Image (cartoon, rainbow, N blue to C red):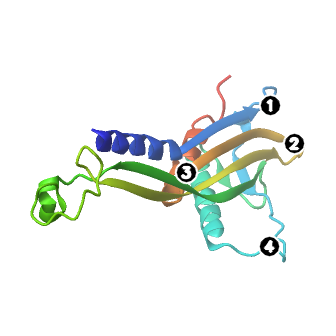
Amino acid sequence: MIRRLAVVSMVLFLAGCNVLSVATQHDPSISLAGYSRYDWMPVKVSAVRKTNPHREQMIKKLKSIVERELGAKGLRQSSTEPQLLISYYGHSQDKTLLYNEYGDYWGSRERYGAYSKGGGDSVGTWWARDGSIPSYEVETIDIVEGTVHIDLVDTQTLKAVWRAQISGSVDRKNAAMELEKSLVDVFSKYPPRR
C-alpha cells in the first residue's frame, strides 16, 4: 500500500514538473488583422556570451514554431517590407529536484531463509518489526525553469502591439515538446478576438 501511494505521488509530482503558463497582451486600439508581413528583429550577440548548444537548439525550435504558426495565420516573412518585427528574449535556469522515498522492501521474510526469524542459523533480525526491510530511495529529476517573452513590434511606431509570455518549469527531457505546445497555445490567441 505504501509503495502504491509512493508511485502515485511520484507520478503526480512529475506531472507537476511540466507546468508552463501562457499569457498574452495586446494594444486594443490596433487591429492586428491588418498585418500580413513580418521579420525577425536583429539580435545583438555579445562576444562575451558563451554559446550554449542547448540554448541555440531551443532558439531554432522557437523560431521555427513561430514562423509555422504565423504562416498558418496568413502572415509571411519579408525581410524587405515587414510590418511587424518579432523580438524574443528570456532566461532559464537548470535545476535538479530530489525526490526521496522511504518505504518497505517488497520481499517477504521467507525469501531470505537464514536471515528470517526462526529460519535456520538466524544471525538476527535486521528488518522492521512487521517483517519488512526498510528501504530509502532517492531519484533526481533535471528541470529547466524560466520565462520566454515574444513581442510583435509595429515597424512604423516601433511599439509592441502584441506580447506573449511563457513561464514555468519543465522536465529537461520534455523541454522542446512543452515549448512547442505552449507556443501553439499562445498563437491560438493571435490575432485576439475583439
- Given this view, does label 4 or label 3 mark the residue nearer the observer? 3
Residue located at (67% from left, 51% from top): 146
Q: Which residue is mark 2?
A: 159
Residue at which label 3 appears: 170
Q: Which mark is nearer the camera, 3 or 2? A: 3
Quickly name the residue at label 1: 27
Where on the picture, by quarter, is residue 48?
bottom right
Most foreground residue, 30 or 135: 135
User: Foreground residue, 95 or 160?
Assistant: 95
* For the residues bearing labels 3 and 2, Cβ distance under 8 angstroms: no
- Look at the numbered discs 4 and 3 and tell me whether their residues touch, using CB distance below 8 Å: no
SS at badge 4? loop
User: The C terminus is located in which quarter?
Assistant: top right
Amino acid identity at mark 2: Lys
Disc 2 or 4, which lies upstream in sequence? 4
Which SS class for mark 1? Answer: loop
- Circle nearer the N terminus (4, 3): 4
Above/below status of 90 relative to 25: below
Query: Mark 2 or mark 4: which is in front?
Result: 4
As drawn, 35 above or below 144: above
Q: CA distance from mark 2 to mark 4?
A: 28 Å
Label 1, label 2: how far apart the Cα atoms are? 10 Å
Which mark identifies residue 49?
4
Indicate the amino acid at tag 3: Val
Q: CA distance from mark 1 to mark 3?
A: 30 Å
Q: In this image, 174 relative to 160: left or right?
A: left
- Rendered location of residue 59, percent (x, y): 65, 62
